[in-house]
Amino acid sequence: MTNGAERGRFAPSPSGRMHLGNLFTSLLAWLSAKSAGGQVVLRIEDLDAGRCTRACADQLEEDYCALGLFWDEGGSAGGPDGSYYQSRRGARYAAALETLREKGLVYPCFCTRAQLHAASAPHREDGQTIYPGTCRALTPDQAAERAETRPPADRLRVPDREIAFEDGHLGPYAEYLARDCGDFLLRRSDGLWAYQLAVVVDDAAMQVTQVVRGSDLLASTPRQLYLYELLGLTPPKFYHVPLLLSPDGRRLSKRDGDLSLDVLLSQSTPKELIGKLGYLAGLNPSARPRTPESLLAEFDWQRIPKENIFVPTGLFF
Ligand code: GLU
């Protein structure tokens, strides 16, 4: 164990160049762990081989270093937990799936994407469909027969109860899993591990004590907490941070190519970028250039906005 010290993490998906929004979240993750005298782990979330590349992962490391966001364990250097690339950690996810299967909580699902849509399943606010339970009651014989024509996905049976937690930044949050989420995927029919399972297995194995990430993942947290409970693992503390919005109110995304680091770093120095992000975070009194270290003394969750943040015109673009 880590002597009670805080362990934060960067968990980027290497599907493109780092973006202003990812950088904002990473800066806060780094400040939160380091201001508590803790460490930061770098885990590369490259499960989706079709979208993620090693070149992008290497570029992410270069970008973090250029910005002064140094990590203590993981990334290409690896560490005590072996490979820190999710694409190479499948055996751990398979073991967790087996544990859940032994509890009788996993069932094969043969639904196609089209069938899920046609089932007119209700949608969550975040646009995801709530699984209507089509394959929940298949008998072993029925499942075996269907498996002859289509490989199944694996789904977790969720309980009819509320999962509540206290977010370190946003306060209380709860979901009724059966109503708000439905039985969720652990592994897709093509073998791809689901984010929800991988992130829990990895944060626990890497002894992460605090997860700082975008508030778009707040609604994933109850599912993850349920997995921690089932797997007998200790959950970290969660801090969900506001998203950055363009002046017209859109969420900044990888599609905003002008906000990717290659363009930003061709127009500003790393210190200028960190200073501006520190300003948006309420930690830097003006947009003047800063290093991450110089913001440590000012870091305080109370100062970070809770609402999504409009990036004023002219600050970066
Ligand atoms: N890999 C995810 C991303 O890049 C982050 C997942 C997490 O922080 O739990 O958005």
Image (spheres, rainbow, N blue to C red):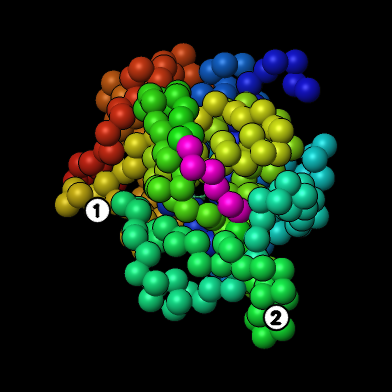
Element marked by disc 2 = helix
Q: What residue is shown with label 2?
A: 145
Q: Which residues are magenta?
A: 156-161
Question: Residue at left 25%, top 42%?
Answer: 311
160 falls in the magenta region: yes
User: What residue type is disc 1 on?
Assistant: Arg
Disc 2 crowd rating (10 Å Cα; few below 14, some 14-19, many 20+) is few
Question: In x, y percent, where is residue 266?
Answer: 41, 53
- Please say whether residue 92 is visible from this viewpoint: no
Question: In x, y percent, where is residue 127?
Answer: 35, 58
Tell me if residue 200 comes above or below residue 156 in the rendering. above
Left or right of 191, for residue 296: left
Question: Mark 2 or mark 1: which comes first in sequence?
Answer: 2
Q: Quadrant of residue 155?
A: bottom right
Q: Residue furthest bottom?
A: 149
Q: Nearer the viewer, residue 286 or 168?
A: 168
Tell me if residue 37 comes above or below residue 292 in the rendering. above
- Please say whether residue 144 is visible from this viewpoint: yes
Element marked by disc 1 = loop
Q: What residue is shown with label 1?
A: 250
Left or right of 243, for residue 158: right
